[in-house]
Image (tube, helix red, strand yellow):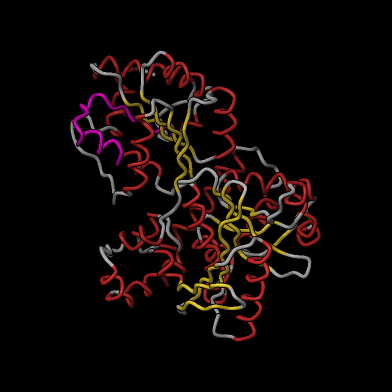
Amino acid sequence: MEKNEIIKILYDWNFWDRDLATGIERGPYVERLLRYLDTGLVCVVTGARRSGKSYIMRQAVKRLIDKGVERNEILMINFEDPRFPKLDVTLLQKIYETYLEFLSPKETPYIFLDEVQEVEGWEKWVRTMREIKQGKIVVSGSNAKLLSKELATLLTGLHIDLTIFPLSFKEFLSFNDVNLKNKLEIEVREVEIKSLLRKYFEFGSFPEVVLNKEKKEILMRYYDDVINKDLIKRYKIRKVEQMKSLSRFYLTNVANLTTFTSLEKHLNISTDTIEKFSEHLAEAYLLFLLKRFSFKVREQDKSPKKVYTIDIGLANTVGFRFSENLGRLAENIVFLELKRKAQNNPNFEIFYWKDEYHKEVDFVIKEGLKVTQLIQVCFNILDEKTKRREIGALIKAMNEFELNEGIVITEDFESEQEIEGKRILFFPLWKWLIN
């Protein structure tokens, strides 16, 4: 590939002589990415396809320029650009040399490598560049295992990770021009916030989906891309219909318990295939399998897993109709918010709890060696039978973990009650999400 061809492609993705579109800024992610860059480590940005990784990297570039970094000292390469031929380290090195020749940066450049897993052998190149101090490097990719496996062998102790999720509800409100500055504004705009929560429930929160009218069409395209590009093509899967059947089953059964053995009977697919395909679906960030709480790892692994998806819009589009499953969707929303919180605390672990009498608590939060919080999602708390069942399970778990306070997340009920000597806090989902 000739250098003049390379520089034309690079020009389209870089801020060298003009600003590019950066979208609505997702400040907390951008700030964390810039802090990570200051550590001198390789910054690894991962997350689901279309969760906003590329735009967050662009926003970081814009912040660097605003802080005084010269435009020619920043290089961004998008490896999904179809104009690049077969991607390998030789081409990557030639791209870098072309950049140096045409832009002549005076300082060590910032190098952003978007969808880097497309380049065979990229990890050795990145390690070398870091070791000889030729670049401050950010890499991104849409596959958790691919990046972590390669990094574990070649960049041990030399990288720091940032996982990007689709929009939180607070970000979703911001994308809909609702920026809440204080508690009074929250109360005044309650009706508007609840109306937007309904949309959040139905279409999820991939940024492009939120900003466009053709929401279901975009969601179906995302799903097809994940299945066909991130899974079938990448892993050379031959049992295509079995993979699709399994993914549809999971998306139809969010917040439900499942085992590979039960799926074998239901889908007529071997447990080995189900286990392998489930790992691939998780690696592509399409789903999460939550483990049961136990201090014994073997018991965690043997127990049924609870299924959650990266975006409830996908579940509604591919799986079931959202209006019939608000409680399960609410539970999925809470799970994703807890996953976001876990990024700020390496000791933060999430489980579900279930005893021998099948009493269940949706979320157990463990920090270090201690369980610190229990959360029950009960959308229909006004049904007395449901309330007794859910609160009874919560109190049983609180006794087991010696906790005096528990949380119940509801559709719209707010209260603080003392039940059997325990303090139970009831929060409407919308308030819990924005506070």
At a point 41% along the width and 70% down the height, the residue shown is: 430
Q: Is residue 215 left or right of residue 305?
A: left
Q: Is residue 334 left or right of residue 272?
A: left
At a point 81% along the width and 60% down the height, the residue shown is: 265
Q: Is residue 177 above or below residue 126?
A: below
Nearer to us in this view, 411 or 360:
360
Nearer to us in this view, 153 or 427:
427
Q: Is residue 42 left or right of residue 368?
A: left
Residue bounds of the magenta highlight: 59-79
Q: Position of residue 248 (x, y in %)?
A: 63, 59
Quarter placement of the C terminus: bottom left
Q: Is residue 353 magenta?
A: no
Does the rendering let one see residue 252?
no
Q: Position of residue 65 (x, y in %)?
A: 22, 33
At a point 68% along the width and 70% down the height, the residue shown is: 396
Q: Position of residue 97 (x, y in %)?
A: 34, 15
Q: Quadrant of residue 11?
A: top left
Quarter placement of the N terminus: top left
Q: Position of residue 323 (x, y in %)?
A: 52, 76
Q: Quadrant of residue 379?
A: bottom right
Does the rendering let one see residue 58?
yes
Q: Is residue 68 above or below residue 109?
A: below
Nearer to us in this view, 21 or 126:
126
Q: Is residue 76 magenta?
A: yes
- Figure disc tally: 0
At a point 50% along the width and 75% down the height, the residue shown is: 410
Q: Is residue 220 above or below residue 278?
A: below
Q: Quadrant of residue 178?
A: bottom left
Farthest residue toward the front?
A: 421
Nearer to us in this view, 113 or 297:
297
